[in-house]
Amino acid sequence: MNPPASYAARSALLIEYFADARGGQPAGLIELSARLHLGRWDDASDQLLADILADPHGDMFWMIPTALVLLAGRGTLPEARATQIRDLWRTYTPYRGDTENHWLMYHAALYVMAEHFPEADGDGWFNGRSSQENLEETRDYIEHWADEVWRDGQAEFDSPHYVCFFLAPLALLYGYAQDPRMKQLAGTMLTLLAADFAADQHGGLYAGALSRVYPQPCLERWRNGSTTWAWLLFGNIPLKPDPINRVLQRVGYRPHGMAVILAMSGYEPPEAVVRLANDRTRPFEHYERHRTRRRIRYARPVEPIRKTTYMHPHYAVGSVQGGLLQPIQQHTWEVLWKTPHPFDGWNVFFTVHPYSDPHEMGMYFGEEPLRMIGELGASEKPTYDRADKWTGGSPYERVYQHRNVVVALYDIPPGTRFPHVSGYVSRRLAVVEDEATGWFVAYGDQVRIGCYPLAPFEWRDEDGGGLDDNQRGDRRIHMPHAKSGFVVVVVSSDEYPDPADYLAALVASPFETARYPVPRVRFTPPGGPELQVAYDQTFRIDGVDVDVNNWPRYGGDVMRSVGDEAVEISVEHGTCRIEWKVLMGEYPDHHA
Amino acid sequence: MLLASVLETDGYVVGSNNGPSGFHSFSDGQWRHAGWANVRAFGVDVEVGSGAILLACGNGLLRSTDFGTSFRVETDWRVTEVLDVLPRSTTPTATRPTFLATAFGVWRELQCDGASGWAPVNKGLASTYVIRLADVGGGRVLAATEAGAALFLPHLERWLHVGPSVAARSLDVTDASATGAGLWLMGAERGGVHTSRDGGTTWHRPEPGADHDADHDTLRRDSIYAVAIDPEDPTRLAAGGLSGVLWLSADGGDTWRMAAQVTAGQPGDAIHALAFAPEAAGSGLLCGCGKSGLLTLDPETGATGSRALEKSYVSKIVYRP
């Protein structure tokens, strides 16, 4: 379904879409909320709600939609059902969770409930704390989280799957919090995260480095819940939410469906944010700083993450610096390009060292590290301990990026479980190679990806797997060497219609590389500056060190931090200023 | 009183319809669950005097005054991944507030009243990953940390690391007020067991000897997640962990023998909890496992008797007379 032009029309359409369960999905709390928002209720809806409430489970994924049903249903929801939901918040004991998105959902839902039922004592809530205690604690946490994100970024930054679980609780707060200061905080954070998303997506698809992504939706990026949110926020991709959630088959778990909360909330993104998302007429550079997930052991508790994205009309190139920044699901760098239809999929190119070690487990989880890998194999992250996996970070990977050029270097010590590096080469790409030098160009659609592998490798055909079992034609670069890397230079077909011409230009470019004692590269791409770097050493551009110690929270051509005071968005025909004092309620929000 | 904490049931995922974890107690010949059904509980204990149940959980310290029917979350969002709880104690010579071991450091209640809040107390800790706590008298607390054992000295308000630099995973101690310095027993990751009888000044590790070559050599390399001292006979010790082997000592830790292969020893089914429990039906030694649930073992042979809480990860078992 193509998006209507206006945000208001998209909001209305999305509410109707879910109220009528038009996607053919089994109706649940999201659908019931939408119906209540529209003032609709019937016997079938009532029976559905009764069935759902009879088996409460889902922790924070239960808290958000039950709070929504209760609050959106004022005036329509039968009193008996409202009382039933309220009583379940006393008897059902949702867990707080252990990740950033869990915590925001938990605290946001408990906040709105405590605010709407302010007189209850400890017997009135599942956690034994009074409404006032819950209100104070949840407000304290939400304000802490907002301030931390403002200053140091997110741990679960730029996740096409998990962004939904940050936007949804903020939307709940914006739409249903009574305290105008909390509503203002939520609205400001929605704008900040929407702008962050806008700068990091290409035609509605999240692009570049990602903190967390599941394996199959990494390759078919449209499957992620973020796509539905992009449809709503930016109107730049058709609507096609997976029926329930085909990434994780779990009732009540609705990364796509929760977008209806935003539609119901009354929030509308500033025009400048929508323009930022949609304007891909000119290339731009964009920088962000985020933070690692809090480390339990083996490393500094928190480290800054430096993110670079180069956005072009036909493609995006994005990266973070490498290392273990997020457990299990990190996606360190990639090229993503535009295809004839946004749901074509398989439009990514990247490399990965498939790291698997108790060290990573012990860094990020409280259980005994040696037992955890076996546990992951039986859980929803079964690819962790596989040599052929496509997701995950590595302590032996360093990535450097300048605009459309990525240098990914690897130095894998002896004894590492999987001492090889893999490169994903999509079925959408053909390859032309220069055997004398080792350069090749992978080309397809409107992208030309020049690649120099630093070490010998073999081509392997990928032959199966995936949600629709239609994965044929992809290829893998298998590079079984401890010291290795890749130099990747991306251009569009506008610059080099003939891939052979591009290959010739790369072959003719000044280029030096070595693998010992550590991989290093000295390279001048066509029309670009000299790039020089060795593994784990300073990156130099035309002889000038890249300053990694003053990485901006937001920087580049379209979105910039002004100290800690504000974030400014500046695009053609539109500007927007997001202010910390508005976030913290010291100023009124003149955009509201 | 025989209590157990369950971290999770088989297939646990946050947000899913999970089986009952959390607080369990033994009565009338069987184990029963009470309270929160889906909380991740790493430890359990009883508050002396009040009899309140204390549950160390991922979402904080949970406290129940009705034997688990309902719980109150005692800590706020700053406290997370609580791996153990040491209830407050009041003796003629010292009053010590409740301590919490967490993956991010130690917390202590500000006053012994349960209402004044909590504050971190980490000064001197080389690692803030703390998994087990034990009372060693005089207001002092022994902690198992990623950097070895650490002793909290209340008059200095700081921790002092004692003993070998190992990733400590388990602790048990004898009652110091009854037996002088008492026996301190510690299990370590890939480090076997260590004992001290002089308040942590010196530590002993079973050495390969003529009669115990193979056993001691294997024990030294095992990751010991659970240790227990028989409260009725402190020369009887038990240890177990990643290998799934039950190790027994009859001489206070000088020598050990491989008594039984209790679980398969896979990473997912290690031994995580041990307790000598005279009340336990049919046996005096209880064993909590990662998947095999809660087993009763013969304290001499290690043979498995009854089984309970199958497909559960039993994280701690405590016996309180």
Image: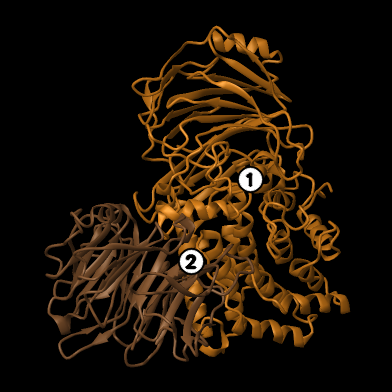
Q: At 75% from the left edge and 44% from the top edge, which residue is drawn?
A: A236
Residue that carries the numbered disc 2 in the rendered image: A143
Label 2 or label 1, whichever comes before in sequence order: 2
Q: In the rendered view, would you say A259 is above or below A423?
A: below
Camera-side residue: A310 or B306? Answer: B306
Left or right: residue A483 versus residue A439 is left
Residue that carries the numbered disc 1 in the rendered image: A198
Left or right: residue B102 versus residue B213 is right
Q: Please, which chain is the residue tagged with disc 1 on?
A: A
Query: Looking at the rendering, which quadrant does residue A277 occupy?
Result: top right
Label 2 SS:
helix
Q: Residue A261, image x and y in percent?
A: 70, 64
Circle 2 crowding by C-alpha within 10 Å: few under 14, some 14–19, many from 20: some
Q: At 58% from the left edge and 64% from the top edge, which residue is drawn?
A: A186
Are marks 2 and 1 in one subunit?
yes
Task: Give the chain ID for the brown colour.
Answer: B
The colour assigned to chain A within the rendered structure:
orange
Camera-side residue: B171 or A571? Answer: B171
Q: At 31% from the left edge and 69% from the top edge, which residue is drawn?
A: B238
Q: Residue B257, image x and y in percent?
A: 28, 62
Assign the N terminus of chain B to one quadrant of the image: bottom left
